[in-house]
Image (tube, rainbow, N blue to C red):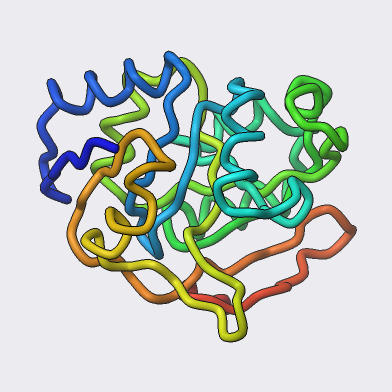
Amino acid sequence: MQRIFFHGNNPNKRDLKEVAERINKGEIVIFPTDTIYAMGCLMTNRNGIERICRILDKKEKQARMSLICPNISVISQYTQPIDNHVFKSMKRYLPGPYTFILKSNNYVQKFFKNNKEEIGVRIPQSELLDGLHEFLEAPLISTSLSSDDGIQKFFTDPDEIETLFQHKADILIDGGIGDNAESTVLDCTGEEIEMIREGKGQVD
């Protein structure tokens, strides 16, 4: 695994392009978000999704993968039509530490074994990810970097992450110590928006 250092503000565009090209070719990346570190690959990388599940020893359904998108317009390309009240909430809270659960469209479902009918979507508050998106062929699909053995533990220290995953993932984007709080999860698949996990993002 190659460890690449980035400044959170004004990350180097040339380095971001090189990382994006490797992700576009199928590599697995560990990266910081506005919450905790995550592991991901290109959404269209079916083999990459399976590999991430093997690395984390989780079944696909348990991995709770989410799309990392640059804006709401891109999100709408991968979901069923978004209700107006949900769209307004997304406009209000994004970008930020929130995951919105939406109904996926047929294009998304073909990349998952269980025909994933719902998908989490995120737009983190992150200059690094904004810059990376400029060079990616599709959104990232990712899952939080955590262990579920006994007490759930989030991996926030790049040194620890490198030690644990150096022979498993391909790239570690080191953006410094990560946060220790997950995103707030809002389920938008029903008639009303339901908060199913309270995390870093506050909800009125």
Q: Image check: 15 left or right of 41?
A: left
Tell me residue 149's x, y (percent): 60, 77
Q: Residue at x 13, y 21 (%)?
A: 14
Q: Image check: 140 left or right of 65?
A: left
Q: Say which quarter of the image contains residue 132.
A: top left
Q: Is residue 123 in view from this perspective?
A: yes
Using the image, determine if residue 48 lies above or below residue 166.
Answer: above
Using the image, determine if residue 179 lies above or below residue 57.
Answer: below
On the rendered image, what quadrant is the N terminus found in?
top left
Query: Foreground: 176 or 78?
Result: 176
Q: Residue at x 77, y 70 (%)?
A: 194
Q: Image check: 13 left or right of 193?
A: left
Q: Residue furthest bottom?
A: 151
Query: Foreground: 32 or 50?
Result: 50
Q: Image check: 51 left or right of 156?
A: right
Q: Residue furthest front?
A: 167
Tell me residue 175's x, y (percent): 20, 53
Q: Is residue 202 in view from this perspective?
A: no
On the rendered image, what quadrant is the C terminus found in?
bottom right
Query: Foreground: 182 or 83?
Result: 182
Tell me residue 4's x, y (percent): 17, 39
Q: Residue at x 80, y 22 (%)?
A: 110
Q: Residue at x 64, y 45 (%)?
A: 53
Query: Foreground: 89 or 113?
Result: 113
**Tally of numbered tags:** 0
